[in-house]
Structure formats: structure tokens, C-alpha cells
Image (cartoon, rainbow, N blue to C red):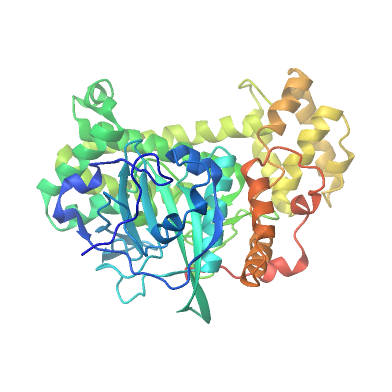
Amino acid sequence: MTSTTSNAPGQPLGFQWQPGFSALGGDFYTELRPTPLPSPHWIGTSDDVAQLLGLAQGWSHADDALQAFTGNQVLQGSTPLATVYSGHQFGVWAGQLGDGRAILLGETSGGFEIQLKGAGRTPYSRMGDGRAVLRSSIREFLCSEAMHGLGIPTSRALCISGSPAPVRREEIETAAVVTRVAPSFVRFGHFEHFAASGQEAQLRALADYVIDRYYPECRNSAASRFGGNAYAALLNSVSERTAHLMAQWQAVGFCHGVMNTDNMSILGLTLDYGPFQFLDAFAPGHICNHSDTQGRYAYNRQPNVAYWNLFCLAQALLPLINDQPTVLAALESYKAVFPTAFMQEMRKKLGLTQERAGDEALTDSLLQLLARNAVDYTIFWRRLSHAVRQGQFDPVRDLFADRAAWDAWLLSYLELLALEDRALAGNLMLGTNPKFVLRNHLGEQVIRAAKAGDLAPLQTLQRLLERPFEEHPGHEAYADFPPEWASSISISCSS
């Protein structure tokens, strides 16, 4: 019934598949084939992810690759499936959800799951068409690779293929498919699903699978802290990974926009790029998602939302842990780890290599100063990095309307900086504070060009974002202030 591509070992798509999530059985997913799209063509590819997967050089020149990663053919040995999960969306229990437009091709022998996003309807599409459009696919492709370039845990993106097939959103757009890669796409919502339906055997099987594959330490050393309870150790480990992820998001000024429990990775990865945004002017209460009318997922609320989501995961794991005080103890690691991890990130941004009295107050006062003056977040940190290296702070001072307040803060900062090796501090900062991030207007410019058939701007921006700490002479415009029209860009859950 299924057609296959020619992908024997030694061919461009010579994947060797291994049992992974599919070994859990039919209660966890539905097997199905992707729905083909007409006249596919490449939009973008990532050489870095291709190497990660062990693809042969020139793989993207093979028509088999284009057809397979558009969903028009099934890779040899692949058994495509869509997984079922549930979750809380905007703080409200949404019941059964699932992969409504994502189809898992399988897990490679290298331990990476490959998933097609936008490859057609599944049993979990809930009245949706199972498709993704070009604009959102470009955003996800670029941001996946941009976050990796920043050193932030994330799913990756191998490629985007496009098709002239029409897709209706607010207007008629064209279809696209993103090939996503991660060690696992298991979410908090997978656990919530089986806990809510009272399927404790399936819940235990899922937890055992995740522990054995990704958290083996929870069977021994980590579990000893919780009376040998591996499931409590799992909750503790996920809480700590999530805390570190939130610290990195906040430090770089990243807004996810839709932190539902079904968008939270059990591995602490950034997952599901929808209405995301990197801050322009520093505004702690910024809401990047036009659909988020209550501001639940505002930038400054993300750390608390992550804890709320972990609490939902904890409730789902309670039948396995079977002791509420142990659950709470495992969950509390988030509250301990996040502030410490965040200050570690901020010290690196400031070029401070050791924890000293006053650095937390210095950081808090700086963030308040940035907010009061609506200073561009990325440009500030990059200019500060160069200023520390060169000893010239006037370009930083120019960013502030309240120059006196900046001067006062700078005096306090220089006192701490005097305890550091200035050259080493500057190098640390230049390797921590990126010159390039995926601002909304840059993504919009690339999308407009791609819709007109010009993919060169996408390729240029991709190169910059893959190495965001390098200077890239001649591309200063990509690191400049956003144009006035950027404030009118509206990003929502629609994609």
C-alpha cells in the first residue's frame, strides 16, 4: 500500500531506523501516511542538521529527499505516526489534543526523531487542515536554528519544502512542510493525557520509556534523594532542565508566546515555534502573541508559567509517585534552580566571572533602567560588550534618555568590573551577547522575499543566525534598530 524511496545504505537518505516511541504501542499513537502536496520545491535546508543526521553530502539534490520530506513518499523502513496527548491551553484544560499536523517518521539509529510538520490531517487535527503555511514554516525553520546558534536547547529543523497548494488562514496562503528533528518530541501533555483518562498502566509505560531512554540516572543516584522513587527523580530532573531553559530565554530576551502544557518538552527543549519574538525595546510586560488577550504568556510571566506547567506535570505523575510531599519536594527544585541559573546567565552577559555581593542588585537596577528608557535589548548588550573591550562607553550611553541614571549605574558596574580581567570579560560578553537575533521584521522581510520567489535573503539571514556572535562584516543592517513599521507586525497562533 505504501510507496517507498530508494534509500538503502550509501544513498543520500540511508536512515537506519530503530524502535523508539513506536515501541510503546497503539494506545500512544495512530499510524498514518502523510498527505501529498503537489509540485514541491525546496525553500531552505540546514547543512548542520544534515550532518547531525549523517546525511550524505548533496542529499538535497535528490528528488527522493524532496518527495520524502514533503510527505509525498514514505522513507524505506519508516512507519509514520501521529501521537496523542492532552493539555492545558491558556490555563484551561483542553482535553485531548495530539499531533494535529505533525507526523513522526521514526527514530534514527543516531537517536533523533524526525517529524514532518504540515504534512496533512491526522485523527487529532480537531477540524484543522493539518497544514502549515510558508510564513510560519520559515519562522520555525529560522528560529530553530537561531536558538541552536545561541546555545539554547531546542528542536532543530532540517529543511522546509513549499508547494503552491492553497491553505486558508486569515487569507489564502501557500503550503509548506518543516522537517523537525529532536531526541524526543514527548511533551508534558503526553503524561497529562493518560493521567486524565485514568490509564495508569500507559502512564507508567510512558514514564518508564522516558526515564530509560533520556533520564537513566533517575533509576539510581537521582532516585536516592526521593527514597528510590524514579518518577519523583524524573519530575525533579525535568523541573531543573526547565528552570535552566527559562533562565536562557529570559537572558536573551526570547518570548515563546504560547506556553501551553502541550508545548512543553519533557527534555527541556524549546519546542513549537509559533508566535515567538525576540524583544526589541526592553519591555518586561511585552506580549508577543496577538491571540494572548489576557497576557498570560507575557515575557516577564514566562518563568512563573513554566512552574505552573510543571505543577500540571506533577499532578499527572502523582499516581506513580504516590506521595504528595515527595511530589512537592521534587517540584521545588525549579524555584531553587531558576533564580540561580538566571543570575549565572546575567553575570556572563555582564562579563562577571564570580558571584559577588551586589551583582544581583546591579542586575535588577539595570533591567529597571532598560525598561524605563525602552532601550533596545540586543543592541544594548552588544554595545556594552564592545565598550568593555574598548573602554569607550559613549555608544552605550547614547541609548538612554536618562543619561544621569545610566552614568550612576555605570559607576557601580565599573566597580565590579575592576575586579575582573577586562580583556577576558569582554571576550566572555562578546561570546554571550549576540549581535544577531531573529527579530520580527527580519523574519517578515525574508518571508516577503520568499513569497516572491527570492530565497537569497533567507539564506543570508540563516547564515547570520547560525553564528550570531560573529561580526559578519557587511551585514550591519541585520543588527540595526527595527524600522518603525516593525511595531505593526502581528503574530498570532494562526499558522
333 lies left or right of 96:
right
* Front-most of residues 123 and 282: 123
Q: Where is residue 179 in the image (x, y as percent from the top left)?
A: 44, 55
Q: Where is residue 215 in the image (x, y as percent from the top left)?
A: 29, 31
**Residue 33 occupies quadrant:** bottom left
* Residue 301 in view (yes/no): no
Q: Position of residue 84 (x, y in %)?
A: 24, 59
- At 49% from the left edge and 62% from the top edge, which residue is drawn? 161
Residue 475 versus residue 33 in the image, above or below: above
Residue 395 versus residue 216 in the image, above or below: below
333 lies left or right of 394:
left
* Front-most of residues 421 and 106: 106
Q: Where is residue 200 in the image (x, y as percent from the top left)?
A: 11, 48
* Residue 71 in view (yes/no): yes
Residue 344 versus residue 86 in the image, above or below: above
What is the number of callouts on the image? 0
**Residue 382 occupies quadrant:** top right
Q: In which quarter of the image is the N terminus?
A: bottom left
- At 39% from the left edge and 39% from the top edge, which residue is drawn? 10
**Residue 279 occupies quadrant:** bottom right
283 lies left or right of 15:
right
- At 69% from the left edge and 67% from the top edge, which residue is drawn? 487
* Front-most of residues 6 and 331: 6
Residue 376 versus residue 136 in the image, above or below: above
